[in-house]
């Protein structure tokens, strides 16, 4: 498995905009963006339209700029929680930040669907939150959580979506 440390980081900020910035600036998956500030601004502008806090401690913030060649996803884990004005008014402990190009809509939607498949599983959410302070998943035994970590580390969401959902047909 590739290293999930490139895509998962601990978040200290409690303000949603500062937490988004912290993830983009600290997760290596975003390090080669040519204009991080413009990307962060795109995520913030999307968040101003309507919160991406979907409830159950999860938010999926996203922004689109032209010069992102492939969909990228990072996950910020927050032990204390982030005020996201989520639909259930609870703090967010799992903050996903998705970056994509407006020309990669299908890949973006498959990525979103693959993430949603995992975060709806209570055990996966709880395991991720449990590791929010140390990001040490070496003792992880929950198969669904290991699948999620593999998907995040490899950043192949569309392929994962196609494989998992085609096998159900």
Image (cartoon, grey):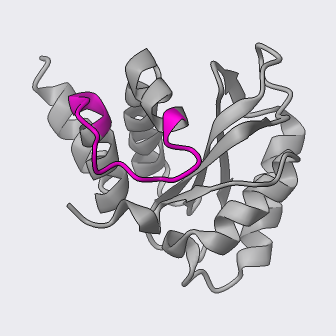
Residue at (12%, 17%) from the top-left corner? Answer: 169
| Magenta residues (range) | 130-145
Image check: 51 left or right of 68? right
Residue at (28%, 39%) from the top-left corner? Answer: 140
Figure quadrant of the N terminus: bottom left
Q: Main secondary structure of the magenta part?
A: loop
User: Above or below — where is 23 with respect to 30?
Assistant: above
How many marks can you see?
0
User: Above or below — where is 56 with respect to 138?
Assistant: above
Q: Where is residue 157? Give x, y as percent.
A: 33, 48
**Camera-side residue of 162 and 20:** 20
As drawn, the residue found furthest toward the top would be 88
User: Above or below — where is 69 with respect to 10?
Assistant: below
Residue 20 belongs to the span the image colors magenta: no
Res 168 → quadrant: top left
Residue 133 belongs to the span the image colors magenta: yes
Look at the image and tell me whether residue 121 can be seen.
Answer: no
Residue at (78%, 20%) from the top-left corner? Answer: 90
Q: Where is residue 142? Give x, y as percent.
A: 26, 29
User: Above or below — where is 115 with respect to 98?
Assistant: above
Image check: 158 left or right of 104? left
Q: Where is residue 121? Give x, y as percent.
A: 40, 19
Look at the image and tell me whether residue 107 can be seen.
Answer: yes
Q: Where is residue 107? Give x, y as percent.
A: 40, 50
**Camera-side residue of 65 and 43:** 43
Image check: 91 left or right of 162? right
Residue at (21%, 31%) from the top-left corner? Answer: 143
């Amino acid at each position: 498995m590739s290293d999930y440390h490139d895509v998962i980081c601990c978040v200290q900020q409690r303000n949603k905009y500062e937490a988004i910035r912290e993830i983009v600036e600290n997760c290596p998956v975003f390090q080669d963006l040519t204009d991080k500030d413009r990307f962060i601004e795109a995520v913030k502008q999307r968040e101003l339209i309507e919160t991406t806090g979907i409830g159950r401690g999860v938010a999926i913030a996203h922004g689109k700029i032209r010069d992102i060649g492939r969909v990228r996803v990072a996950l910020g884990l927050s032990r204390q929680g982030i005020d996201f004005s989520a639909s259930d008014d609870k703090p967010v402990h799992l903050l996903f930040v998705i970056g994509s190009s407006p020309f990669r809509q299908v890949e973006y939607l498959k990525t979103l669907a693959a993430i949603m498949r995992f975060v709806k599983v209570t055990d996966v959410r709880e395991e991720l939150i449990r590791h929010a302070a140390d990001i040490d998943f070496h003792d992880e035994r929950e198969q669904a959580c290991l699948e999620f970590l593999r998907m995040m580390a490899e950043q192949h969401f569309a392929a994962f979506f196609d494989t998992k959902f085609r096998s159900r047909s």
